Amino acid sequence: MRAELHRYYDRLTSGICLIGMEPEEPILFVNKGMLKIYHCTDEADFYRFTGKRLQGMVDAEDYYPIAHMAGSDQTGFVTFRFRTRDEHFRRAEGSASVISFEDGTKAWLLQIISSELKGSSAQNDPLTGLLGMRLFFRKALMVARQESPKGRLSLYCPTYFNLTNFRLYNSLHGLAAGDHCLKYIASVLQQSFPDALISHLSADGFAVLAMKKDLFQTIEVVCSRVNAYINNSNIVLKAGVCLLEKDDIYIVRHTFDMAKIACDTIKTDATRCWAVYTRDMGEALEKRAFVLENFNAALEKGHIKIYYQPVVRAMTGKICGVEALARWEDPVYGRLTPNVFIPVLEQARLIHKLDCYVLNQVAKQLHYRLANKQPVLPVSVNLSRHDFNLMDPFVMVEKVISRYDLQRDYIRIEVTETALVKEKHNLIQTLRQFQRSGYQVWLDDFGSAYSSLNVLHNYHFDELKIDMAFLRNFNEKSRRILKAIVLMAKELGVHTLAEGAETKAQVDFLKAIGCEKIQGYYWGQPMSYEDIQIFCENYEYGQETRREESVYDKAGLINVVTDVPVAIFHYDGKQVVVLSAN
């Protein structure tokens, strides 16, 4: 069958691939047209580049499962951006539909054509009247050849404009209105850059080879006019600029990709309408590519390690738990920090694989300690908001708990405040299911999003993890806010944990206002499994027992910030120890 598919589909110039019906969306087949679109030499090269999954074919911001792209009738028009093997951005347009084979199995048939191929035969874009892609780059190269010998090439700036969330505009107003909007953008660009080369590169992208003089003021005028026309803060025009540092005529085409990279960095930044490409952006893109290409192998080979950061009970100084954190230690590339690989995995909808892996490793290590009668501390694990769309987190956690024969209260579930704001309908029911089954549910990064109080109003958490930003800017105002948060939490019967404590002054203040738990470098940084065991064994104040935890949790809800004299003490039948006094 494979040979027959090749003979038939290789006659077509469009890109064809078959996608499996499994959740991973594996690529089963590609034709020569698809290899040409992605600039891959052969099938093996294409499979390495994409990870042999549909997700690897699509720009992270445009990715949706193919069933979502095709629609409920399992056949429909699709469009998405992608990156070629040699690092050029393109837009694909085509269709997705379900096909059946003689043996009864089914697969998705994805047929696309690149916007570059689509417009290659036209001198001008038929919709906007601007230069077609091929003609635009040919003329840009001619300008470079003319100006480079004169040392004038650096006076030009490759600039890329992108209309963010153009898909939303089409959904709200219809395709005809979308076409009219693109025509309006083209007319604004022509009026603002009367002597420049301008092209409509893709559905929502435009390229301008403009002079550097007054460029940024002109960009701001263009974006302002277009945004006023659209009048929707979720759909705005952004620009990226690449400054030419040398008279190299052969990098002109690549500089527009650099400009697009710069533009992409501010897509979610409401305060900026343009950005200039820097080498750091290129390095970040290289790291992103490395993460996507090597993530599965890193899991299989154990390059992703589990680190633990201690959590200390403010009242006693004892270690009362640890947070599990992922660290990527590649033998060749070196260490990748979480702020590098976690956002990439979230954008690529792969974060659920990491979260499953972390929980499995944590459970395995807990099981080992219990089996060998070693002290065990409860472990908090993080769930991404995407987990609730990509899998059933409750079922996943239950399977792991059952596999390693653990009690549920050994695992604490952390979700971020942002997750509750953006995915609340998917989350609430699952979080209630966790709590009904005996898990504690914690709200992480409390105070980092814009509707914290609304989140608390709609859902009861067992514990608030107060965002470290309040301690990073440790001033009188942040002290008042921290105090108010702790007092409010006690009124609601919710426990508190402050993240990011680094100094004795911060720790003393948190104790004084009745914050129950503290986490941060003052007590200990994230450590490997072996190091956290040594740390706990040698820790001056020891580890909290499970029996102590229930007692101190109740004591922690007592408000000591009051004019009434209040003291909390521990009595073991022989000795009285004052734990807290106002």
Image (tube, grey):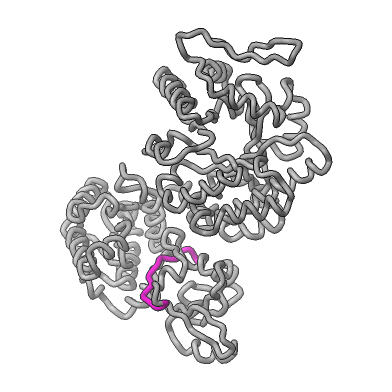
Query: Which residue is depicted at the point 45% across and 21% down?
Result: 483
Magenta range: 74-87
Q: Residue at x 70, y 35 (%)?
A: 377
Instruction: Count how many numbered circles sit on residues in the image.
Output: 0
Say if residue 284 shows up in the picture. Answer: no
Q: Residue furthest right?
A: 372
Q: Which quadrant of the view contains residue 376? A: top right
Look at the image and say whether residue 81 sits in the magenta stretch: yes
Q: Nearer the viewer, residue 312 or 15?
A: 312
Please name whichever residue, 438 or 469, is drawn nearer the observer in this view of the structure. 438
The prevailing secondary structure element of the residues shown in magenta is strand
State the image coordinates of residue 366 (x, y, percent, origin top left).
Answer: 73, 43
Does the image show residue 459?
yes
Q: Is residue 405 or residue 419 the one in the foreground?
A: 405
Examine the image and state in which quarter residue 94 appears: bottom left
Q: Is the residue 542 above or below the residue 236 in the image?
A: above
